[in-house]
Amino acid sequence: MNRFYQLLIYISLLGASLFSCDMDKGKSSDSDALFMGFYLGMPQKDFFDHCTELNKQQLITQGPGGNTNVEHLIKDKFSSEVSMRFFPTFIDHKIFEMPVTYQFISWAPWNKQYWADQLLEEVLEDYKKTYGDDFKLLNHPTQGKVYYRIDGKRRINLFVKDEQFVQAVFTDLKVEKRLKEEYAKKISPDNN
């Protein structure tokens, strides 16, 4: 788990620097879309209302782990059935970040064809079709291959979490930047 947080910090710093460069150039994008009608900045109440509607349509269910895990089964998109689980992080009662995990339903330690490294390639191809073909590769010293894409205020990180899971993280860079600035002010020696 420690590796995971190191990776997020590293990519956050990289993303913040790239995001601030884009802001300086005057580039902006209203590309807040995530998937299934969810979006960055979506109010918390709207998230739960939308989940209720998707559940009525039998597109999602409550995933393992209680009411903080939503599951969507993907049957015909990948080489085998895949479980997609997600639940956002809310800041100011709006979606700030959306971590998503993918796993082949048939995963088992002895089924190498259903390990996460195989699934990563399939999810990456799907993400390129959905979000754009310009994902960049970062070879992280401990995490391995990390694919990322920055589009306006949205950053997408995609990587193998472990043998079983592929992890995607959608982040609102505007909120992340604000949170970092607020944190820097709190720990600044000038505030003493």
Image (cartoon, rainbow, N blue to C red):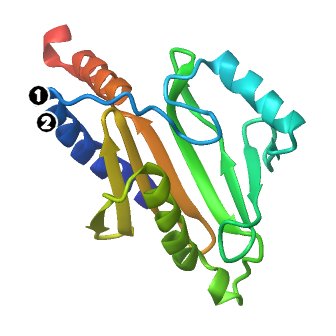
Residue 111, image x, y percentages: 70, 88
Mark number, residue 24: 1
Residue visible at 10% across and 31% down in the picture: 25
Q: Is residue 179 left or right of residue 162?
A: left
**Image quadrant where residue 78 sits:** bottom right
Q: Secondary structure at mark 2?
A: helix
Q: Nearer the viewer, residue 85 or 1?
A: 85
Residue 118, image x, y percentages: 55, 79
Q: Are marks 1 and 2 in contact (CB under 8 Å)?
A: yes
Q: Secondary structure at mark 1?
A: helix
The quarter in which the C terminus is drawn is top left
Residue placed furthest toward the front: 129
Residue 89, image x, y percentages: 56, 32
Q: Would residue 160 be visible to someone looking at this image? A: no
Q: Which residue is mark 2?
A: 21
Residue placed furthest toward the left: 25
Residue visible at 75% across and 69% down in the picture: 81
Q: Would residue 23 be visible to someone looking at this image? A: yes
- Label 2 amino acid? Cys
Neighbours of disc 2 within 10 Å: few (<14), some (14-19), many (20+): few
Q: Nearer the viewer, residue 44 or 188?
A: 44
Neighbours of disc 1 within 10 Å: few (<14), some (14-19), many (20+): few
**Image quadrant where residue 76 sits:** bottom right
Q: Name above or below for residue 54 compared with residue 5.
A: above
Q: CA distance from mark 1 to mark 2?
A: 5 Å
- Label 1 amino acid? Asp
Q: Is residue 106 left or right of residue 127?
A: right
